[in-house]
Image: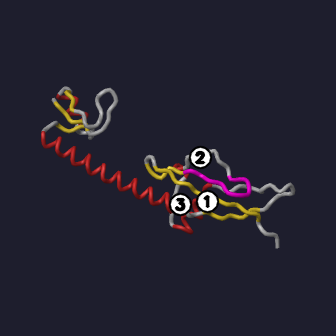
Amino acid sequence: MKVLMKKDLKKVGKAGQIIDVSDGYGANYLIPNGYAVLYTAEAQKQYDIELEEQRILDEKKRQEARELAKRLEGITLQFEASAGRNGDMIGTVSFKKASEALEKLHGIKINKSQLIDKDVIINGFGLTKLRVDLYKGVEGEMRIHVKLKEKK
């Protein structure tokens, strides 16, 4: 039985490949679980159409991510913190606090899984830049500025 693979399956084939499998394996496992469809010229055309739609959607999302990266360039989140006796900042500004401020003030939602520099800790005064992965291959930069809290 010839089948057209719709998804990658280890040791069987990759999406888009046309492979020969036993009738039982194709009819009882690959096709019902959505890994493949019976190969016909119509199935090939349908797969090509789906591939093109996916490519267009992917390009649209990539363009939106580029626009979001440009918006992030012009944004610097401002925070205030107290200083200890030796002038160092007390505490840290967490990524959660920064992302909540970004969403509240600018309507941009970024979650922690998008953070590229996971080991960066915002525990000092001044400007800190955090790189975030907005979409496949598109990076943005969150800028966070921490200044000394004025004593009253």
Q: Magenta segment: does it hold 72?
A: no
The structure residue drawn at horizontal position 12% and vertical position 40%, both measured from the top left corner, is 41
Residue 130 % position (x, y) = 60, 52
The structure residue drawn at horizontal position 60% and vertical position 57%, both measured from the top left corner, is 96
Question: Which residue type carries mark 3?
Answer: Leu
Between marks 3 and 2 in the image, the one whose residue lies nearer the viewer: 3
Which element carries disc 2, helix, strand or loop? loop
Q: Is residue 83 above or below residue 29?
A: below
Which element carries disc 1, helix, strand or loop? helix
Question: Gap between marks 3 and 2, in whole Å?
Answer: 16 Å
Instruction: Return the residue at label 2.
Output: 117
> Which of the 4 quarters of the picture holds residue 3?
top left
- Magenta stretch, residue numbers: 122-131
* In this picture, residue 129 sits left or right of residue 16: right
Question: Which residue type carries mark 2?
Answer: Asp
Residue 83 % position (x, y) = 80, 60
Indicate which disc residue 72 carries: 3
Q: Residues within 10 Å of mark 2 (few under 14, many from 20)?
A: few
